[in-house]
Every structure is written in structure tokens, then in C-alpha cells.
Image: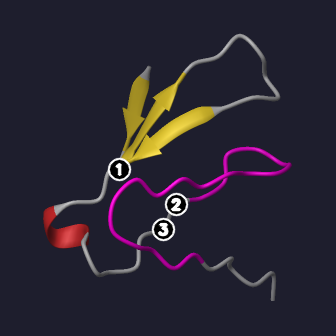
Amino acid sequence: MHRDGLELIYDTPAPEFAVSVLTLADEHLGHEVDAPSRHDGPQILLCTEGSTAVHGKSAL
């Protein structure tokens, strides 16, 4: 596993499957955070505490 900014990325043996954890605390709470997708395909976001709003960036 390795860290890239706010994201902790777990290495998996399957290239089509990825697991990562975003931990938002302190100065990041209540602010927009850029978390780029590292792969194509569906993604699942699980919020374990509090609430969140998720927005995709426009391709324009």
C-alpha cells in the first residue's frame, strides 16, 4: 500500500479492481477535495461517518 495525498491506495493482484481510502480531517472538512479517478469503470463510494456530496467534473 502507498499514500498519494489524502488517498491511501491498497495494491491488488487484479488490474481491474482497486481499493483506496480517503481520510478527510482537520482543514479538509467542509471543503472541496479533488480525488481523481485512477481507472475507468464503475466506482463505489462508502462514507463511514458524517455526510458527503459527490460531484463529477465536467468534460467541457
Say whether residue 47 is magenta: yes
Task: Check disc 1 and report the residue beneath it.
Answer: 6
Question: What residue is pinned by disc 2?
Answer: 35
Name which residue lies at 76% across and 44% down.
39
Q: Are marks 3 and 2 in contact (CB under 8 Å)?
A: yes
Q: Position of residue 27 (x, y in %)?
A: 16, 70
> Residue 47, how many percent across, how many down?
46, 58
Magenta span covers which residues?
A: 36-54
Between 6 and 42, the residue placed more toward the observer is 42
Q: Mark 2 and 1 residues: CB-CB less than 8 Å, in contact?
A: yes
First of labels 2, 1 by sequence position: 1
- Mark 2 packing: few (<14 Cα in 10 Å), some, or many (20+)? few
Q: Is residue 18 above or below residue 38?
A: above
Local crowd size for mark 1, using a 10 Å CA cut-off: few (<14), some (14–19), many (≥20): some
Image-based side of 50 in relation to 44, left or right: left
**Residue 18 x/y as whole percent:** 67, 32
Q: Which image quarter holds the N terminus? A: top left
Q: Main secondary structure of the magenta part?
A: loop
Q: Which mark is residue 34?
A: 3
Left or right for 37, reference 23? right
What is the residue that sits farthest to the left in this orientation? 26
Say which label, 1 or 3, has the lower sequence index.
1
* Residue 34 horizontal side relative to residue 25, left or right: right
